[in-house]
Amino acid sequence: MEARGIWAEEARGAAPEGVRTRETEREGFPVTRVDILDEQGARALGKPEGAYVTVELDCLERREEDAFGRAARAVAAELRALLDLKPGEGVLVVGLGNRAITPDAVGPLAVEHTMVTRHLVEKLPGHFGSFRQVSALAAGVLGTTGVESGELAAAMAGAVRPARVVAVDALASRSLSRLCRTVQIADTGIVPGSGVGNARAALNRDTLGVPVIAVGVPTVVDAATLCADVLAEAGRPGLDPGALGDGGRGVIVTPREIDRQVADIAKVIGYGINLALQEGLTVADVDMFLS
């Protein structure tokens, strides 16, 4: 959505060739899907060809009735469509990020809410044979493990041989209003750290050998972008964050209630993954399993 928005601003609203956008609703939440159809569209938006889905979860922040359950089901429906799994195909869930840094802890926390079933299906088929085999990895970061998260994910994928990998990570946003309020899903994989200028090895079909579905939540914005965003809201749009020089670069801003917001959104993602992978389950079923 952000890449398309930048294009629209520069092109005075014209839609780029090779890009298709569809706006719908899931469980009362706005959903925007941007499909990059060919190389021309990829060049225009600076993204690989594929599907990019944004689920806006403002109702979750307002604590509306059944907001959590509706949010989890909305994420599950969009994720299920991109996964396109056949019965019996296994999935590896990889939580990217640093658990010790709150805005970067979305991935590891989402893994804590993921139903890990591979060992149960193999050892107790009489009780769990109807479940899809799911493995999980909280990959950590290079500075704490000495190993690239992509390398760990590749080793794990080689061992369990999943049909798909779901990679969960925190993102950097261009818009203050999207922080901890949107879930972004793409079928093109992810490059950890790229949003904050610390790009690591990519997780995608080329590196892991299977399709990688990326699930991300914007949790930070750099100070220069924040200044431009605030000025635009005050009626002074058009400021290029790059015009502010290096003063705001390297300064990362995050919401005051980031602890609660990350915990809430990571649980939504974890439950959304469970509902997408295990057909027929409800939020109450997941609560019982994880307890």
Image (tube, helix red, strand yellow):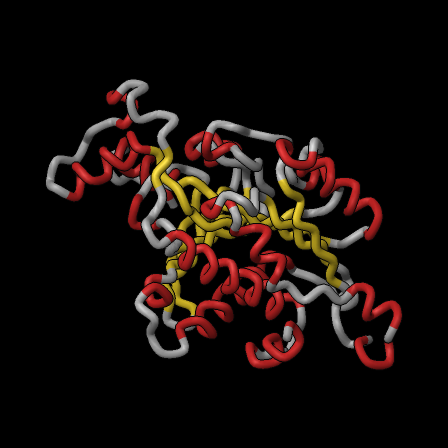
Say if 232 sits above or below 122 in the image: above
The picture places residue 96, in percent across and down from the top left corner, at: 60, 45
Tell me where residue 290 sits by quadrant.
Answer: bottom right
Q: Is residue 194 above or below residue 57?
A: above
In the image, what residue occupies the spot 39% across and 52% down?
258
Image position, residue 104 (x, y; %): 50, 44
> What residue is shown at x 60% (from left), y 70% (from top)?
275
The mark total stands at 0
Q: Nearer the viewer, residue 218 or 22?
A: 218
Q: Say whether residue 80 is left or right of residue 222.
A: right
Q: Residue furthest top?
A: 245
Q: Is residue 22 visible?
A: no
Q: Image height check: is 149 above or below 271?
A: above
Q: Which image quarter: residue 3?
A: top left
Query: Vertically, is 172 above or below 283?
Result: above
Q: Position of residue 199 (x, y in %)?
A: 55, 29
> Is residue 175 shown left or right of residue 162?
left
Residue at image position (65%, 39%) is: 203
The image shows residue 229 at horizontal and vertical percentages of: 24, 39
Identify the residue at horizontal 30%, vertical 67% (top origin).
62
Of all residues, the one furthest to the left in this rendering is 235
